[in-house]
Structure formats: structure tokens, C-alpha cells
Image: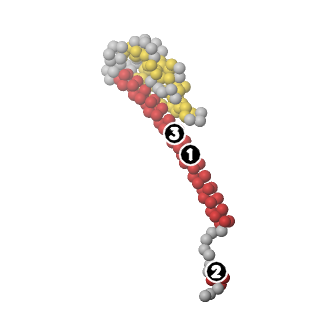
């Protein structure tokens, strides 16, 4: 029988030392930590972008409502007069003979029908900083086709008390000719 000590001396034991394991686990931990930070940052950016998209979609919807109603409206008044630049409210007679009025109430673009309660058209996280109407040829029968330009400056509040400011503008003209 051979000597067991000589057998152990001739074989090499393969494996990692404690130091190699500590270094590899440390490197892996740093990589995972950085990756998790990047993923959390991406989720935060995605949430902010989603909030902004929803608010802008909401503002676009409000502008579509205004544009659609003005196309079939008549007797336009901007701050109570048929021609104005930079007016804060727009009122007119809608297709169903009701009086529609648009203005900012409590920081939100709002709509009133026949002098009733103002209903907000924009969401609560969309704050209207400035709303102005430019109206040319608002009086019926004046021989000038009505042209309404609506300008809105607003901001969208998102998580972390961050706000994104943007501007929207549209121009509409009624379908009924007034020339």
C-alpha cells in the first residue's frame, strides 16, 4: 500500500480562496447596486412622463371641445365685446341655442352653460397659468368671418414636486359664413 501523504502532496486541490470569493461578491454587489439605481431612476422618469402625457392629453381634449363648439357657434364675445386681443373669457351661442362660456376658474380651464356652474375641463394636476382668447369678427352680420385663437400656458405637477411648463395654441373659425 502506498503512503497516503504522498498521494495528497501530488494532487492539486482546485477551488477559490476566501479572498477571491470576497472580491467577486463585492464586485457583483456593486454592479447590482448600480443596476437597481438605474432601474429605479427609469421607473421615476416613466411615471413623470406618463403624468405629463395624461395632462397634455387632457388639455388637448379641452381644446378639442372648445374647437368643436366654436365651429358650430355664433355671436362670439371675448370679455363681453365682439373683438378683442388677450381676453380672459370667451362666450357664444352654441348650436343648441345655449350660451357657452369658457374661462379659468381656480387654475383650471372651465366651461359653463347658460350661466350655470363652471365645470373644469382640465385635470387637477394641470394648472392653467394663462388663458387668453383673441377674437376677430365676433359680431354676427358684421361682414367679417369670426376667427378665434386660444392660447393656454400651463404646468403639470408630477411626483417629487417637479413641474413641467408648456404652451398650447389653436385657432378655429365657425363653419357658418359671416361675409
Work out how far the residue at label 1 is from the one at label 2, CA to CA, in angstroms.
52 Å
Please report the residue visible at 54 percent of the width from the left and 46 percent of the height from the top.
42
Quarter holding the C terminus?
A: top left
Please report the residue visible at 48 percent of the width from the left and 15 percent of the height from the top.
79
Say which mark, if any, is on residue 40.
Answer: 1
Label located before the other in sequence (2 or 3): 2
Outermost residue, bottom direction? Answer: 1
Above or below, comparing residue 22 to residue 70 in the picture: below
Residue behind mark 3: 47
Q: Which sits in the foreground, 90 or 98?
A: 98
Residue behind mark 2: 8
Labels 3 & 1 near each other (Cβ < 8 A) = no
Q: Which sits in the foreground, 142 or 24?
A: 24
**Which of labels 1 and 2 is toward the front?**
2
Secondary structure state at the residue bearing disc 1: helix
Label located before the other in sequence (1 or 2): 2
Amino acid at each position: 500500500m502506498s503512503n497516503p501523504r504522498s498521494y495528497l502532496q501530488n494532487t492539486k486541490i482546485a477551488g477559490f480562496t476566501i479572498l477571491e470569493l470576497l472580491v467577486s461578491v463585492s464586485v457583483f454587489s456593486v454592479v447590482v447596486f448600480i443596476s437597481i439605481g438605474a432601474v429605479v431612476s427609469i421607473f421615476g422618469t416613466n411615471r413623470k412622463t406618463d403624468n405629463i402625457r395624461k395632462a397634455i392629453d387632457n388639455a388637448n381634449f379641452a381644446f378639442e371641445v372648445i374647437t368643436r363648439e366654436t365651429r358650430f357657434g355664433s355671436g362670439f364675445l371675448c370679455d363681453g365685446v365682439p373683438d378683442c386681443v388677450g381676453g380672459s373669457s370667451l362666450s357664444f351661442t352654441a348650436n343648441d341655442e345655449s350660451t357657452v362660456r369658457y374661462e379659468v376658474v381656480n387654475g383650471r380651464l372651465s366651461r359653463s352653460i347658460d350661466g350655470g356652474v363652471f365645470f373644469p375641463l382640465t385635470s387637477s394636476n394641470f394648472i392653467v397659468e394663462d388663458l387668453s382668447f383673441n377674437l376677430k369678427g365676433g359680431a354676427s352680420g358684421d361682414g367679417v368671418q369670426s376667427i378665434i385663437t386660444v392660447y393656454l400656458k400651463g404646468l403639470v405637477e408630477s411626483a417629487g414636486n417637479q413641474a413641467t411648463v408648456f404652451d398650447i395654441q389653436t385657432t378655429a373659425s365657425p363653419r357658418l359664413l359671416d361675409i
